[in-house]
Image: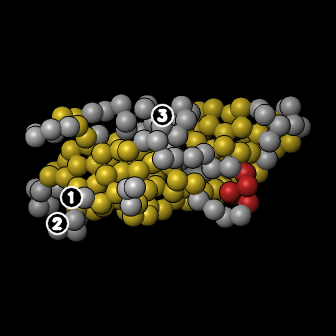
């Protein structure tokens, strides 16, 4: 069993608190992950969807958020999300090039390789204007903040996974 922490960063212009619409533990937010089978090394062709609101009972006990067989070697693996450890990406973090931890994934039989940004994000301007349902699949977002009388922008979105030691 290995836990992986998903970390995100972006260049935020006049914005802060980038996170899923319902917060970092949004049960309706869908994560799109490229997974690698730990048995044979096969990488999923398409991104695999996983979210907190989807729960699958495990054969012995407990639940998981994703149970999937490798198309190549047919070995089954699971991905279970562990909420409560994420933080929004702030303007200060963005300016210093830091990454914000978003979600922990308990992976058994799979290793996450990549995260695809999609829709369902929110952020707020430095003046307090809220922007919801941001689609980051094109890799950027721009809008005008009437209250702050300035442009706002999210660009250069990036992510990576780190092995996470549960404490």
Judged from the image, the secondary structure of the residue bearing numbered disc 2 is: loop
Q: Which mark is residue 45?
A: none
Looking at the picture, tell me which residue is in the foreground, 12 or 106.
106
> Colour scheme of this structure image?
secondary structure
Q: CA distance from mark 2 to mark 1?
A: 7 Å
Disc 3 crowd, CA 10 A, few/some/many (<14, 14-19, 20+): some
Judged from the image, the secondary structure of the residue bearing numbered disc 1 is: loop
Percent coordinates x, y for residue 162 in the rendering: 43, 64
Q: Which mark is residue 39?
A: 2
Left or right of 109? Residue 139 is right
Q: Which mark is residue 109?
A: 1
Residue at the limit of the structure toward the bottom, as seen here: 41
Which residue shows up at 86% across the image and 42% down it? Answer: 150
Q: Which residue is mark 3?
A: 26
Frontmost of labels 2 and 3 is 3
Q: CA distance from mark 2 to mark 3?
A: 31 Å
Marks 3 & 1, CB-CB < 8 Å contact: no
Which residue shows up at 80% across the image and 42% down it? Answer: 126
Marks 2 & 1, CB-CB < 8 Å contact: yes
Can residue 93 be seen here?
A: yes
Picture quarter with the N terminus: bottom left
Which residue shows up at 76% across the image and 51% down it? Answer: 13
Q: Earlier in the sequence, mark 2 or mark 3?
A: 3
Q: Quadrant of residue 141?
A: top right
Percent coordinates x, y for residue 125 in the rendering: 76, 39
Disc 2 crowd, CA 10 A, few/some/many (<14, 14-19, 20+): some
Q: Earlier in the sequence, mark 2 or mark 1?
A: 2
Q: Quadrant of residue 55?
A: top left
Judged from the image, the secondary structure of the residue bearing numbered disc 3 is: loop
């Amino acid at each position: 069993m290995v836990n992986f922490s998903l970390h995100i960063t972006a260049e935020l212009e006049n914005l802060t608190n980038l996170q899923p619409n319902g917060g970092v533990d949004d049960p309706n937010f869908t994560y799109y992950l490229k997974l690698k089978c730990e048995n044979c090394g096969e990488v999923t062709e398409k991104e695999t969807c996983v979210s907190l609101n989807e729960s699958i009972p495990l054969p012995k006990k407990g639940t998981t958020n994703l149970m999937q067989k490798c198309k190549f070697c047919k070995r089954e693996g699971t991905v279970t999300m562990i909420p409560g450890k994420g933080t929004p990406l702030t303007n200060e973090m963005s300016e210093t090039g830091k990454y914000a931890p978003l979600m922990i994934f308990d992976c058994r039989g799979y290793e996450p390789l990549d995260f695809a940004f999609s829709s369902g994000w929110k952020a707020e301007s430095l003046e307090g204007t809220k922007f919801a349902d941001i689609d980051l699949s094109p890799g950027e977002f721009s809008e005008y903040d009437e209250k702050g009388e300035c442009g706002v922008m999210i660009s250069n979105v990036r992510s990576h996974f780190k092995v996470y030691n549960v404490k």
